[in-house]
Image (spheres, helix red, strand yellow):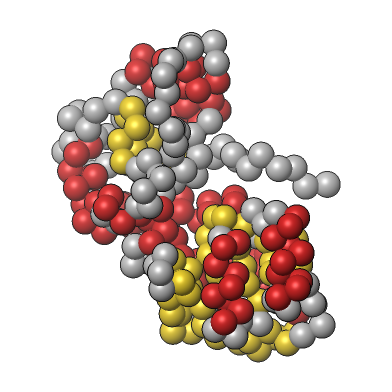
Amino acid sequence: MNLVDIIKFFERKYPLELAYEWDNVGIQVGSLNQQAKKVLISLDLTKEVVKEAIKLKVDMILTHHPLMFKPMDKIIFDSPKGWIIKNLIKNNITVYSAHTNYDVAKGGMNDTLANALDIKNPKLLDLEDEIGRYGEIKTMEFVDFTDYIKQRLNIETLKVIGNTDKIIKTIGISGGSGSKHMYEAKKVGCDVYLTGDVTYHTALDAIALGLTIIDIGHHAEKIFVPTIKEELTKEFSDIEFIESKINTNPFISY
């Protein structure tokens, strides 16, 4: 079994052509023409994740967020990204990333989040960008809903924007940075919209729009790791798929 066999299966479910034009998905470093025994799965690729991969002697790291979004005109080994590339090549570790193609695909990030939140009959939120989901959940008070989100998505903190004096029944969600889709959430009648990386001025726009937003943070996409591990383990029983134990969340809660 080679790495290419894993990726052929993966790309049938999450085709590269679904990725947005600005994105950089697929193989990032290395070769798929090598034997597959161990694969590490991580949300992000940091120096700590690479060190973990070297220690575990894996053949590939499969990430959600790409190592490189833009072309590099130089690779300096003393720089953080240069160190990562050097050590990946030195230890013959391939890196493959599935980002917006995974987000958009049926059964991908947004369906995974919708399932985790137990959204009933989730529908596509933004028809133009083909991303996001919305639907109904069990009715609850807003304060209970925030606890529900933390428990379901395994997150410690969240940020709330807008009116909190309401009953929650219809919710919209878009993994990652989904601020631009808040207008669609308002249009379809969501009581609250969940996404990440909401900026100050976007928050002001949401309040003016009369929409309540919960910023669950970009790191909530860590749900990618156990989900993909389960999918690939079912298909390739002879290969060891390992969840990274490195917390790549750059934010610290106090």
Residue 192 % position (x, y): 66, 76
Q: Is residue 124 left or right of residue 36?
A: right
Question: How many numbered discs, if any?
Answer: 0
Q: Is residue 163 left or right of residue 48?
A: right
Q: Is residue 205 left or right of residue 26?
A: right
Q: Is residue 199 left or right of residue 234?
A: right
Query: What residue sits 70% from the left and 75% below the top?
Result: 209
Query: What residue sits 40% from the left and 45% below the top?
Result: 23
Rendered image quadrant of residue 199: bottom right
Residue 210 % position (x, y): 73, 78
Residue 57 % position (x, y): 37, 25
* Vertical comparison of 232 with 24: above or below: below
Rendered image quadrant of residue 85: top left
Can residue 191 be seen here? The reply is: yes
Camera-nearest residue between 179 and 110? 179
Query: What residue sits 27% from the left and 34% below the top?
Result: 37
Rendered image quadrant of residue 215: bottom right
Can residue 157 be seen here? The reply is: no
* Vertical comparison of 143 with 57: above or below: below
Q: Quadrant of the N terminus?
A: top left
